[in-house]
Image (tube, rainbow, N blue to C red):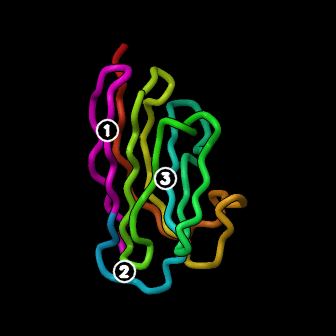
Amino acid sequence: QVHLAESGGGLVQAGGSLRLSCAASSSISSILAMGWFRQAPGAQRELVAVITRGDNTNYADSVKGRFTISGDVAKNTVYLQMNSLKPEDPAVYYCAAALRPVLALAATQASFALWGQGTQVTVSS
């Protein structure tokens, strides 16, 4: 069974940066897109960013210009560079992988079949 493992979370001051990483435990050729979601306490899980095999990307409006998703979907790795972190960014960040074709602009939670266990991001003011 393939697992996704995130790393790179932690505590950072507001305005600082963090880089999250995600990789599959074993190679799986059927991953067609990967993404990052986040869930703050008491809130619903929301899409942060997604990247497809064709390197098409999409971002939540709240992170555009601050976060950058990158990676090699064919190699089952994805990164999230988070700059200018704000007090509203703290959450558990989840990596996800889609096994069916998905348009970056239309990606939702339902588009993704594999999920990591999450990594905590905390921002101090």
Q: Amino acid at mark 3?
A: Trp
Picture layout, residue 14 above or below residue 46: above
Q: Residue tagged by mark 2? A: 1
> Is there CB contact under 8 Å for labels 3 and 2?
no
Q: Residue tagged by mark 3? A: 36
Q: Which tag is nearer the camera, tag 3 or tag 2?
A: 3
Looking at the image, which residue is at 35% across and 39% down?
A: 120
Q: Secondary structure at mark 3?
A: strand
Residue 121: give x, y in percent of width and height: 36, 35
* Number of on-image labels: 3
Label 3 or label 2, whichever comes before in sequence order: 2
Residue 100: give x, y in percent of width and height: 62, 79
**Residue 10 is one of the magenta-drawn residues:** yes
Label 3 or label 1, whichever comes before in sequence order: 1
The one nearer the camera, 7 or 63, is 63
> Is there CB contact under 8 Å for labels 2 and 1?
no
Left or right: where 7 falls relative to 91? left
Quarter-wise, where is residue 52 in the image?
bottom right
How crowded pointer 2 is (Cα within 10 Å; few <14, some 14-19, many 20+) is rated as: few
How crowded pointer 3 is (Cα within 10 Å; few <14, some 14-19, many 20+) is rated as: many
The one nearer the camera, 80 or 28, is 80
Looking at the image, which residue is at 37% across and 13% down?
A: 125
Q: Secondary structure at mark 2?
A: loop
> Is there CB contact under 8 Å for labels 3 and 1?
no
Q: Amino acid at mark 2?
A: Gln
* Residues in magenta, as a range: 1-22
Q: Residue tagged by mark 1? A: 18
Measure how far apart labels 3 and 2 are at the Cα level: 21 Å
